[in-house]
Amino acid sequence: MVKMTRTIETQLKICGLNQESITIFQSHQLTIKTNYLVNFQIKILDYLKSESSQIRAEQTFLATSDVIESLFGKYKQFSSRSPFKQIGQMILSISLSTMNLTASNVLQALETVRYLDLEAWSLQVFGQSMLSKRRTVFSSSSDDTEIA
């Protein structure tokens, strides 16, 4: 039972859930002679059939949340260095965790995207940042205030 459970767990973490999941699982199984293990294997196969039947042939679904949890863990670690704890633009750092950032990637980005365009897009998508709002509120001079 442990071997079957670990096999399907590893398979789903690595390959996801798709139409081939049943075939792959069956190819890794040994000949089973006890009824208890046969029934356990049948339950796993029934589950795979039920779930994979809802997926189109060319699709693969994420079967575990390990990848997402890891990405958000990296995001939290990265954002802990930020003085303002808001998700906004910092959410873009998640994509940095999913790619191999090379000098040529950075060069291409710098040559093809203007800062002004990025700033306009950011304002449109995320709105005014918390820091910008604070600056606006605290920098406005008020004529009804006397300096002591």
Image: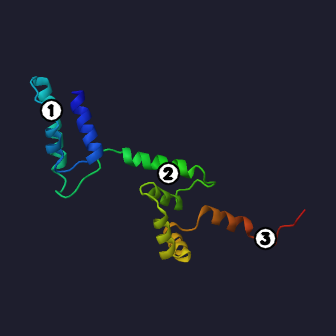
The answer to whether the residue labelled 3 contacts the one labelled 2, judged by CB atoms less than 8 Å apart, is no
The answer to whether the residue labelled 3 contacts the one labelled 1, judged by CB atoms less than 8 Å apart, is no
**What's the residue type where badge 3 is placed?**
Ser
**What's the residue type where badge 2 is placed?**
Tyr
Location of residue 11 by image quarter: top left
Give the farthest residue toward the front: 103
**Which is nearer the eye, 111 or 40?**
111
Task: Look at the numbered disc 3 and give the secondary structure of its residue.
Answer: loop
Name the residue tied to disc 2.
75
Question: Which badge, 3 or 2, comes first in the chain's sequence?
Answer: 2
Give how far apart the Cα atoms at labels 1 and 2 are.
Answer: 38 Å
Give how far apart the Cα atoms at labels 3 and 2 are.
Answer: 39 Å
Question: Which badge, 3 or 1, comes first in the chain's sequence?
Answer: 1
Q: Residue at x 13, y 31 (%)?
A: 30
The label on residue 142 is: 3
Horizontally, is 17 left or right of 34 in the view? right
